[in-house]
Image (cartoon, helix red, strand yellow):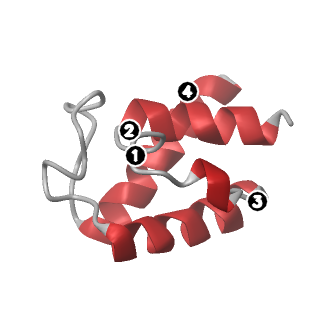
Amino acid sequence: MDVQADVQAEVIAIIDDLFMEDVSDMMDEDLFDAGVLDSMAVVELVVALESKFGIKVPVSEMGRDDWNTANKIIEGVKELRNA
């Protein structure tokens, strides 16, 4: 499995573990509108992502529009890993 697919699989697994929601079939759906994420859930998700991937998510990147879909979350993790 390549690194990109690995990040995607891990992010989907983290969301599933934390929120008991399989988002693999809704990668571009707004996770706030879908009821998967709220402000507290974002904090949980960021902590899990930082721990899993050894990254630091700047508060400036935690806006709702920046991380509101699974694909945007995956892209954000990839960018921070390569920073």
- Type of amino acid under label 4: Ala
In 3D space, how far apart are the residues under numbered discs 3 and 2 (Cα atoms)? 18 Å
Q: Which labelled disc corresponds to residue 70? A: 2
Q: Is residue 7 above or below residue 5?
A: below
Tell me which numbered mark, 3 or 2, is placed earlier along the sequence.
Answer: 3
Position in image of residue 40 (x %, y %): 37, 77
CB within 8 Å, label 3 to label 2 = no
Number of residues whose C-alpha sits closer than 10 Å to that of mark 3, classed few (under 14), some (14–19) or many (20 or more)? some
Q: Which residue is the site of mark 4?
A: 5
Q: Looking at numbered disc 2 in the image, what kind of residue is underneath it?
A: Ala
The N terminus, quarter of image: top right
Residue 79, disc = none
Q: Do the residues labelled 1 and 2 touch (CB within 8 Å)?
A: yes
Q: What amino acid is found at the position of numbered circle 1 in the picture?
A: Ile
The Cα–Cα distance between marks 3 and 4, rounded to whole angstroms, is 21 Å
| Residue at image point 55% right, 26% down | 5
Q: Earlier in the sequence, mark 3 or mark 4?
A: 4
Q: Residue at x 23, y 48 (%)?
A: 22
Spatial separation of the CA atoms under disc 2 and disc 4: 13 Å
Q: Is residue 57 above or below residue 10?
A: below
